[in-house]
Image: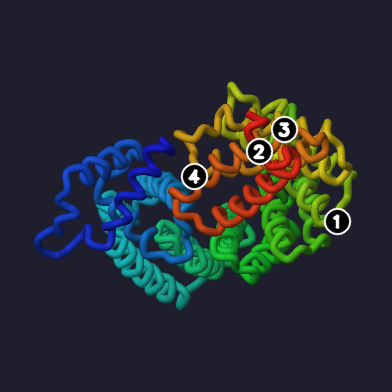
Amino acid sequence: MAGTLGVVVAVVFGVVSVVSGPDQPPQAVRDDALLDRIEALAKQLGIRESVVRTFLQEIGEDPNIPPEEHETVLAQLAQRYKEMQARLARLEIDNPDLAPVLDDIRTRIDAGDFDGAERTLNDAIADQQSTRQRMEEDYARVRDRLIQAGLNEALLLAETAEVRRLRLDDLGAAALFAAAVEVLPDAPDRPDVAERRVGYRIDQANALIAHGERRGGAEALTQAIALMDKVLADINRATTPDTWAALQNNLGSALQTLGERAGDPARLEAAVTAYRAALEERTRDRVPQHWATAQHNLGNALGALGALAVDPARLEAAVTAYRLALEERTRDRVPLRWATAQHNLGNALGALGALAVDPARLEAAAEAYRLALEEWTRDRVPLDWATVQHNLGNALQALGVLRQAPTLITQAITAFEGAREVFREAGVSHYTGIVDSNLARARRVLADLTGGDQAATQ
């Protein structure tokens, strides 16, 4: 689906700002090919065409989302949209007193009317708030109803937060999840209330992480870390081991992102600690795929720390973690995740090879990249394919220099040229510039090795 999505999104974004004119649709919208592409995209994602147009407009109007992320963000929004549809259907059954409101919200969400859904939610929140405030006048008599009203208001606030996330407003969503926590009643005898409080705090932290990662907000990531530390201190690991492990994993992700951006080894060390803590509960025997994910994340943090600190031991540990992950993250089970692990294994091996001037490590890195390319094909995931081609070029160039082998340099040039072509087509100028620089260096190296006679390498 990724290849098709890339083409459709690229075409649609050229006219998305005029897709929903109030009167006569503009010529661009009447174009049959464009309509066919939108229809095909809607079918692939399993959502309505009107919702696809709404999402494309939200993405196209957000300057913080680079073109290479359009496809991923659209797929994420479609998945979150379908999850919200299913959740609202369940909530109507579980919350009969909110059934009319939830039915109206679901109808609007189904039609892609997010403005209307949020208005309905805000109206319902106001109603529940009014109900809650009236109940406070006679707390002892109506305590159970007061608790339920608080739960209802929190639920509606949380669903409003989910609408905000559909609209790429993760920071606004985090504030709404925090508000949901605040309106939950003080009911120590009600475990369901405590569970809801933990859940909303985790949702708030996840929204802050998403904002920090997507928009480069260090403050949001710092807030998420503090919030997860608080939740970890409050919950009982023995009774909620899966929640505890998931929090440790997400804490590691936030710490790693901050550490990589700031070049902060202390943050990266803390990320390593968090991932290892997650592995204490996410054991291979109990949850093999979660275990593999935690091993892969541990490899990422160790690799970043090893590269930053120029520490071969950390890079060796990263290689070990990736290889353990690949024992469960196999190609036949999860081919794209297998390719991701192969790519990251190549990065760690390449860094080790360059640091130790070790041709065997560089050869192993090149082999890992080639394996990744068997699943990350140009048609399926062009930008990922280009990234691996670029990294393969780096490994081949380093190996060619060590062995004074023009053939390897020629292979590196071929890899760089393929990566550059895709990055140029995608309009990703930053990556194109990096590849151009490495390509120019490879050509200079080849000229030095052949005395200017590049034909000798053919």
Residue corresponding to mark 4: 421
Residue corresponding to mark 1: 309
Tell me how far mark 2 sits from mark 1, CA to CA: 27 Å
334 or 178, nearer to the observer: 334
> Which marked residue is nearer to the observer: mark 4 or mark 1?
4
Which quadrant is the C terminus positioned in? top right
Tell me how far mark 3 sits from mark 4, CA to CA: 32 Å
| Numbered circle sitting on residue 412 | 2
> Could you tell me the amino acid type at mark 3?
Ala
Tell me how far mark 3 sits from mark 2, CA to CA: 28 Å
- The mark that comes first in sequence, 3 or 4, is 3
| Numbered circle sitting on residue 325 | 3
Label 1: few (<14), some or many (≥20) within 10 Å?
some
Which quadrant is the N terminus positioned in? top left
> Where in the figure is residue 92, as x and y percent of width and height?
35, 48
Q: Number of marks in the image?
A: 4
> Could you tell me the amino acid type at mark 2?
Ala
Element at badge 3? helix
Element at badge 4? helix
Tell me how far mark 1 sits from mark 3, CA to CA: 24 Å
> Which marked residue is nearer to the observer: mark 3 or mark 4?
4
